[in-house]
Structure formats: C-alpha cells, structure tokens
Amino acid sequence: MLRLLFLGIWVFTTSIVVVYETRPVFGVKVGYQSTGQLTMFMVYLDNGVSQNAKKMLTENEFIHIASGKWPSMYNPKRINYFEQNNLSCGVIKDSITLKDYSYCIPLDSLWKIRFQKHPFDISQGDGWSHKQFKPSPKQEIYLYETYGIKQIDGDYFSDQNFWKLLKDVQDPDWILNYKSIE
C-alpha cells in the first residue's frame, strides 16, 4: 500500500510542467564601444530560468524593435515599450520621402552619466560626471544602489533599471541630484 502511495505521488509530481513566460529584456552599456559609439544596446529573452538569444543592437535597431515597428522575436506582439514607459521615443515617417526615422531624446544624454566632457565632440557640452572618463566613486555607488551597476565599464543598465534610467536622464531634478554627488 505504501509503494502504491509513493508511486501515485511520484506520478503526480513528475507530471507537473511549469511553463515560463518569455519576455524581452533590453539594456544599454555606456562607454567606449568597438563601434566608435558611446552606447551599446542589447536585448535577450528571459523565461524566468535562463537568458537566451542575446543580441547586440544599434541604436536604430533598438528603437525600431522596442517601439514595435519592426517584427522581431524580441517583440513578437509589437508592444511599444516606449509608450508603456512614458518615454519620448519612437519612429516617425517623413511625409515627403516616406522614410522611417527613429528618435529617442533620452538616449542623447546617456553619455553624460559617465563623462565630464563628450570624448569625441566637446561642442556637445558638459557631462554630469565628476571625473573625466567615469563617474566619481560616490556617483558609482549611487549608480549601483539605484540601477544595480557594479562596474560602469562592463555592466549594462538592463530591464526595469534601463527604462527607469531613460526616464531619469530627462528629469531636471534627477540631473541636479546626480551632478551634486561628489
């Protein structure tokens, strides 16, 4: 009788199949990239157990996929993640040429988190960092505590921290606060 009970429990527990929902995770790394850019975008699929299909994206690819304008395995439902996160980003169609143009105002400020001056074009003004090529130690602590970035040279702002960062770099109060951290 005990064997039959164990057999029944074993059959029941081994027949349970957990189905994980796969969702895209977007992110950005800020710093010198091999492409000559100061940002590197990435996306991967997270099913709650593992991270799969990681892909590096250009800024244009990121905007088109995250806005839902391009069909992609990373956004099969074509959700506008910018709209979902109240961000001024997307794709507009030129009425004359009928070409699509991507835009994302907060992306233009990401370099300022890391650099004191734009490393390639000083006409772009000052950054918000207190050191020339990376944030001050206190700013790095702030980035870790707020966004989970342990090392600005290698870590990505990702998932909800990424969307939060894009909102924050548009907030004048946040900018003043970040610049005041010495």
Image (spheres, grey):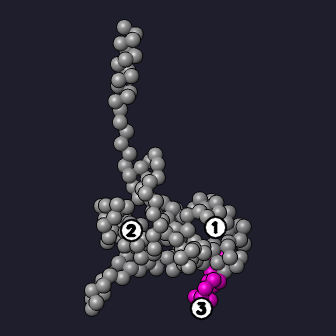
Relative to 91, is 2 above or below? above
Relative to 159, is 180 above or below? below
Relative to 90, is 52 above or below? above
- Could you tell me which residue is drawn at 35 percent across and 36 percent down? 17
Foreground mark, 1 or 2, reads 1
Residue 173 in view: no
Disc 3 marks a residue whose amino acid type is Ser
Q: Main secondary structure of the magenta part?
A: loop
The front one of 58 and 181 is: 58
In the picture of the structure, the residue carrying the numbered disc 3 is 123
Instruction: Specify whether residue 128 is painted magenta.
Output: yes
As measured in the structure, the alpha-carbon distance from the residue carrying label 1 to the one carrying label 2 is 24 Å
Decide if residue 86 is on the left or right side of residue 100: right
In the displayed image of the protein, which residue is found farthest to the top?
1
- Could you tell me which residue is drawn at 53 percent across and 76 percent down? 35
Residue 172 placement: quadrant: bottom right
Residue 73 at x, y = what percent?
A: 34, 60
Q: Earlier in the sequence, mark 3 or mark 1?
A: 3
Secondary element at tag 2: helix
- The magenta segment is 117-129
Secondary element at tag 1: loop
Residue 24 at x, y = what percent?
A: 41, 58
Residue 123 at x, y = what percent?
A: 59, 91
In the picture of the structure, the residue carrying the numbered disc 1 is 153
Q: Earlier in the sequence, mark 3 or mark 2?
A: 2
In the picture of the structure, the residue carrying the numbered disc 2 is 66
As measured in the structure, the alpha-carbon distance from the residue carrying label 3 to the one carrying label 1 is 24 Å
Disc 1 marks a residue whose amino acid type is Asp
As measured in the structure, the alpha-carbon distance from the residue carrying label 3 to the one carrying label 2 is 30 Å
Residue 116 placement: quadrant: bottom right
